[in-house]
Amino acid sequence: MRGVIVRCFGMSDKAPLNPKDGHTPGVSEVSHDLRAVRMLRLQELRAAGHDPFQANWEQTHTSAQAKALFVEGQETGPEVSVAGRIVMQNDMGKSCFIKLLDRDGRIQAYVRKDVIGDEAYAAFKKLDLGDIVGVSGTLFKTKSGEISVRAQRYGLVAKALLSLPEKWHGLTDNDQIYRQRYLDLIVNDESRERFQLRGKIVRAVREFLWSREFSEVETPVLQTVAGGASARPFTTHFNALSCDFYLRIALELHLKRLLVGGFDRVFEIGRVFRNEGLSRKHNPEFTMLEVYQAYSDFRGMMKLVYDLVQYVCKQALGGRTKVPRPSGGEIELGGTWREAKYKDLIIEATGDKDWFTRSRAEKLAACAKLGIEVNPAHPDFAVTQDVFEKLVEPNLIQPTFVTHIPRELCPLAKLTPGDTSTLDVFELCINGQEIAPAYSEQNDPLLQREQFTQQVGEDVQKLDEDFLTALEHGMPPAGGMGIGIDRLVILLTGASNIRDTILFPSLKPAGPAKSEPN
């Protein structure tokens, strides 16, 4: 179409820069330095008496709310006031179409010189892609069938001095996506929708637990003892108390203190910190849900987590229980979930019904034949756990409760009646990773002390004497469960990397040397 200029995401005017002595160049004299172009437009707007950074705009509707008001068959709809970032400009000389991006999506506005006036239109022509504006006017439908706003007035509320990434390629560099998440959210619809869905998932989790009469609490992030899990903590120094503290690695031990205090149903959604490696499945700072219910056990937690996931699917996914896998196929979260004992899965994976009666040396030799790399210094139970992590867990795609794990793997759970080599524990595995572990909680203070002190290896939990003192006052029998919120979001959104579910993941400081995990 003759006389039409269309600009989308980051496309902008590019004119030669050749400033003369003592002369401030106009926009037409500025080169490919897009920021310089925008700075000059900013100066021109201010010189004309326009404030490009307003305190507010009276927004009456989001894009989706405005579109929902339009009634088919009407020539003109109701008046609305919308606001958002300009992501498309279609300049036709004396009129212009723009598209605004807000939290709900995009809405088109039609601006005409003869409607808003010469002066306002002249200022309007100085707007750039990425500028944030408000538009007020009546709704109508274009010849192409798009519901739009016929502008009666507009206002520039925030000038963008830097351009957006180019529309057709978007933001594809992972390092830039994670470092400049704000740009990712602007130009990548999938990312924005994923994080909006994350918020709905967390809200649904809370609503479910509130409906079951669980009390939501907050426990300390800074702790004198890093307990509740086997993990390396972050250490910090508390100046006022003149001693070292740890960022918590789990929520468990303080929540169990509340069981002692009479909070029969309690949960917390909070950040935990583990000073360990970065991977597609692990970020050192992540969000954990922990739930404890008195007069329950690990079987009660099975029912609870199943019901919770069904509720989240209903509320956040619109009732959909099938979720996509990044590698292809689907996971069915409805129906009946499989239950299998840890020992049975190991025997099935190794093809050796006598695995648990064999010596450590025989197990190491079997691992070599199976192609499993194992640290030869690992104790017997850790060798078996290597088999589980490399041969079993990756193949548990559909929801599976793995029950009765070896006693050495968790000092905070009750031993299985009739088999003291295992624990009354399940690990819920979906899509090849653990989503939720749960226990029948150990409430015998003497046995708890014994289980703590029997731990071996570098990840031994420090003895929390105050927690043991609390147990000696009496803790009711209870079931407890943890869910990694980030992993739950990965599962429900079909993301392939935990960093795609965390708005601002842990990254090495930007610099000349860049070494981030894949």
Image (spheres, helix red, strand yellow):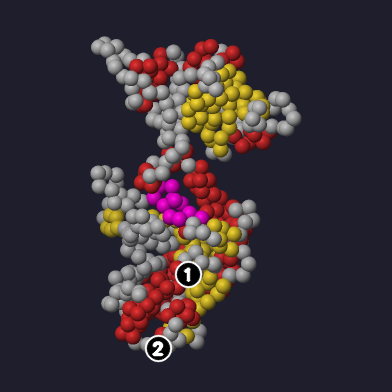
Of residue 314 and residue 222, the one placed in the foreground of this image is: 314
Of callouts 1 and 2, the N-terminal one: 2
- Dividing the image into 4 quarters, which one contains the N terminus? top right
Instruction: Please state the horizontal and vertical placement of residue 150, each as a whole percent of the image.
Output: 62, 23
Q: Secondary structure at mark 2?
A: helix
- What type is the residue that disc 1 sits on? Asn
- Dividing the image into 4 quarters, which one contains the C terminus? bottom left
The residue range painted magenta reads 494-505
Q: Is residue 490 magenta?
A: no
Examine the rendered structure and indicate whether residue 143 appears above or below residue 48.
Answer: below
Examine the image and state in which quarter residue 363 appears: bottom left
- Residue picked out by circle 1: 395
Q: Is residue 499 magenta?
A: yes
Examine the rendered structure and indicate whether residue 397 appears above or below residue 279.
Answer: below
- Residue picked out by circle 2: 357
Instruction: Please state the horizontal and vertical placement of residue 161, each as a whole percent of the image.
Output: 39, 27
Of residue 88 and residue 320, the one placed in the foreground of this image is: 88
